[in-house]
Amino acid sequence: MNKLSFDLSAYLKENKSLVESCLEKILGQLDPNLELVQAMGHSLMAGGKRIRPILGLAAAKACGKNILTALPACCAIEMIHTYSLIHDDLPAMDDDDLRRGLPTCHKKFSEATAILAGDGLLTHAFHVLTRPESLFEFYPDKSILLELVGRISDAAGVNGMVEGQMLDMQALSIAGKNGEKNGWNKERLLEHLKKIHGLKTGRMICVSVEAGALSVEAEPQQLACLMNYADNIGLAFQVMDDILNVEGDPEIMGKAIGSDLLHDKMTFPAILGLDKSKDYASGLIETSLTAIEGFDKNADPLRAIAQYIIDRDR
Amino acid sequence: MNKLSFDLSAYLKENKSLVESCLEKILGQLDPNLELVQAMGHSLMAGGKRIRPILGLAAAKACGKNILTALPACCAIEMIHTYSLIHDDLPAMDDDDLRRGLPTCHKKFSEATAILAGDGLLTHAFHVLTRPESLFEFYPDKSILLELVGRISDAAGVNGMVEGQMLDMQALSIAGKNGEKNGWNKERLLEHLKKIHGLKTGRMICVSVEAGALSVEAEPQQLACLMNYADNIGLAFQVMDDILNVEGDPEIMGKAIGSDLLHDKMTFPAILGLDKSKDYASGLIETSLTAIEGFDKNADPLRAIAQYIIDRDR
């Protein structure tokens, strides 16, 4: 594929703004005087790449259909992603004070408010999926909406994202020398790391593509190819994230691969080394592109997003 | 209604056991080795009256239909109720160590695990509603299931239970002498208290009855009567809870109505006094019984539950 044939930057900007205008509309139906709604809005409108909803829209586009039909599912997924960030940032979890340059929800409001704002976003995401007619011009029919609730709740819940966050927290005690002593060799660590990412972020990325395609009634064969694409870019995204974290950190780069500093975090460069991690990410992206090679130029946004994942600086 | 014509105690026992066997089946489909699933199960199977699902089953019965069709919605509602208890008990919220004689979820596991167990129960509740066929013998058709997701998510979310918990936390700073100084007279306090209870517990009680009736395709007229019934018993239940708390606490009973101890908590006896609170609860129950007087003896469980609310000792 000719990288210059598609203006990804303009595409991302346009679709991000489409998604954000819908998220604002969803918030606009709630009482702006409520502190709860303000806390939900603080996190939901704090920016971010909106990569999940954009992937959903791009999947609908790849099927040659009206992407606006995919917006209800895409917005619901972004609301669920945002709730997960609010809860992950809590003192009992990752204890982060800042996200995207802004105070985290519990810092700006309170811990209790942040827990409830997360709960509110998660619950309201499913509500939005059941009542799209008041918010969106186009939407899937009812049997598809129910199917979307089913697939999204599966990806976000105990078989997906929530269990992924649980494993991620538990992983802290596995990584490092203690892990090695307890039989966590390289292969086992790698499999476990892939499992954590697959659950914590992979399933929501995959369901974004899946929900976009389902919304526009993709053929089963199309859906299968798109989900294969999504599985591979989801993992590639995490591998690249780990790589960029290492390359961006002079303290880590100053030490040899395999040093304690690398080893104490369970990351792909720590397990595979930096070069093999890069090869791994490239291979995943190649597989993702092969998965959608049967699609016409409507799939160019998906292709450009895949390429961007290994080309991005940060 | 002749109170002796219906054995409520046997009815409650039988339906509680029906609900609990389904909740166990839902948990049984998840991996029992996961700490997350164990934490969800700890709270979900910790007992309790199961009053919400039983009300749903009783509403289906009142319509003369197969109550088993209402089970998916009833179980989803109980899962959502349980998640709300887990999050309410957290240190940042009510900071409770015990619930129903057992350690709360964050005490038994950890704060992070409790947050995730709540998130998992909430998310999985919606999943259960979309895939009833693997769990239940009878279930509503797909368009009704989508409507159930819509109504339950509305009652549980920012327009209902989540905002109710938010108001309940904020109410601590309104109650007592500070409130009076700031123009919170008796009428305004009473309205505000009714609003808190209406959102925090009333909407979920109402949607339990509504979901039970909708599951069996109740007529609009039946649905309206049942929701009127539910609104009134929901509030009566809260008024009686406040009354029983006062009567059960010798420290409060030893002081005059209107004492600081009473005033510092926003409760019905604190605002109305004990006798007027009892009259208020009785009036609500009378209204609830009138609302369903058009139903035949299939509504006897609903009638007996209403009566029980003002007759119970605790």
Image (cartoon, coloured by chain):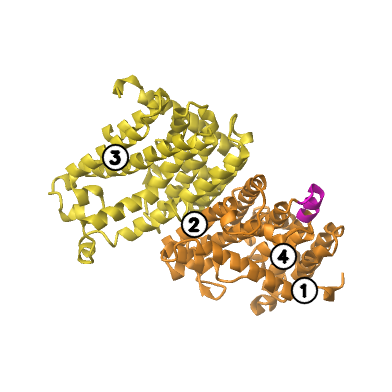
Chain colours: A orange, B yellow
Question: Given this view, does label 4 or label 2 mark the residue nearer the observer?
Answer: 2
> Please, what is the three-letter code of the amino acid marked with disc 4?
Phe
Q: Find residue A237 and name its label.
A: 4
Q: Secondary structure at mark 2?
A: helix
Nearer-N-terminus badge (4/1): 4
Labelled pair 3, 2 in contact (Cβ < 8 Å): no
Query: Would you say A285 lies left or right of B33 here?
Result: right
Nearer-N-terminus badge (2/1): 2
Measure the C-alpha gap from mark 1 to mark 3: 66 Å
Q: Chain of mark 2?
A: A
Query: Would you say B263 lies left or right of B70 here?
Result: left
Mark 4 is surrounded, within 10 Å at the Cα level, by few (under 14), some (14 to 19) or many (20 or more) other residues, namely: many
Measure the C-alpha gap from mark 4 to mark 3: 58 Å
| Residue that label 1 marks | A311
First to last magenta residue range: A218-227
| Residue that label 3 marks | B284
Q: Chain of mark 3?
A: B
Measure the C-alpha gap from mark 3 to mark 2: 30 Å
Name the image quarter holding the N terminus of chain B. Answer: top left
Q: Residue at x 24, y 48 (%)?
A: B268
> Please, what is the three-letter code of the amino acid marked with disc 3?
Leu
Measure the C-alpha gap from mark 4 to mark 2: 28 Å
